[in-house]
Image (cartoon, helix red, strand yellow):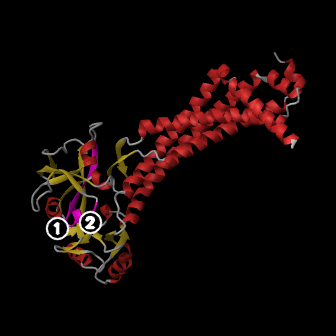
Amino acid sequence: MAGPLNWFSQVVAVTGFNVRTLPQRGGSSAAAVFGIAGVVAVMVAVLSIGQGILRTMENSASFDNAIVLRSGSNTELMSGLSGDTAKIIAEAPGIVRSDTGPLASSELFVIINLPKRSTGTDANVPLRGVLPAAFEIRDRFQLVEGRLFERGLNEVIVGVAARREFAGLELGSSLEVGDERWPVVGIFEAGGGIAESEIWADAAVIQPAYRRGNSYQAVYAKLSSPDAFTQFKDKLTTDPRLNVKAQREMEYYSSQSELLYNLITGLGSIIAVIMGLGALFGALNTMYTAVSARNREIATLRALGFRAGPVVISVLSESFLLALIGGVIGGGLAYFAFDGFRTATINFTSFSQVAFAFDVTPGLLLLGIIIAALIGLVGGLPPAYRAATLPIATALREL
């Protein structure tokens, strides 16, 4: 037992000595810490964009909702359904019925141009034509200001995210749709979902404004339960009058976010790798400098009987500690600077703007700290090996 205990006591003694002398190497240590902190902060911030997109899409869907598009269409923008087709879909089994009829909303999706508040440049903003059932199907819908539009009138209601990001959408203002002015009569929330980036109006009024005739692009339906989806889907896909495909709302919005999420996370990973290499070389330089400055001290310890193993672990521990501090600082900077930060970007599947908030999750913070720790360990390994293998006589002769 004496051998292992002696070895462990050597590790504690040398590591403690290294940590106590860190203030004497404040400049190089701070450079390593803040270099790694920068890597973690940027990586977490970029990846939090992807998490924010995912959170927005998840908040857009309900487990018991379904969306029906034309067969072969992946987005509403590509889809097209006749009025007769929409009526047949609304009568399918599995849809919840209320006193006013089935909870199915045949909807139009068009794009209008509005200036961004931040830059003044034009952006594509979704304008959605809906039926009255839409307000019950989206169970997170909540009118927070004004009133709902009246059926048959050129009036719109605006999502809170759209009002925040784009100019001209304040309550009481009006926007140009087609060749006419449409007043904004209400502001709504939708649980942080993508609907908050949209403008809603009566589908029956949108149709003639955009010369759509009696046609729609999608049908949203509330099912009696998630299990009712199979019956609902089978009825639609086997009906010879229809050429449609049905998806769970969760699956649809998941596929909508996939391209944008992969693009952002891929870009974030590339940035993290490039910056991580820079931080790695910074850690190497810092630890080599630290080891070189203490060559005689380390050689003296080894001459007194300290083994090479404790020396290696002590140097790695110092590098790991500096990296861990950098990771915590970088994660904290990313969280306080970006978590909840709201902006908008292009959704490449619908070619329209989607507003979202950066989401710095605990998982991202943990990932940042792990990356920082790996940089510290890898950056400290070569200097640690050099400290443990440098001949004692050579090190003692160094000034």
- Please state which amino acid type lies under the numbered disc 2: Ile
**Pointer 1 residue:** 213
Is 344 rendered above or below residue 68?
A: above
Report the quarter where the N terminus lies. Answer: top right
Q: Residues within 10 Å of mark 2 (few under 14, many from 20)?
A: many
- The residue that appears at 11% across and 62% down in the rendered structure is 151
The residue at 65%/34% (across/down) is: 321
Residue in the foreground of this view, choosing between 173 and 55 = 55
The amino acid at mark 1 is: Gly
Q: Which residue has dot 2 on it?
A: 137
Residue 72 visible in the picture: no
Residue furthest to the front? 1
Residue 167 appears at what percent x and percent y? 22, 41
Q: Nearer the viewer, residue 267 or 303?
A: 303
- 82 shown above or below 152: below
Residue pushed farthest top? 399
Going by the image, does 386 lie left or right of 169? right
Q: Measuring from the top left, give residue 378's x and y in whole percent.
A: 69, 39
The image quadrant that residue 122 belongs to is top left
Helix, strand or loop at mark 1: loop
Q: Is residue 251 above or below residue 292?
A: below
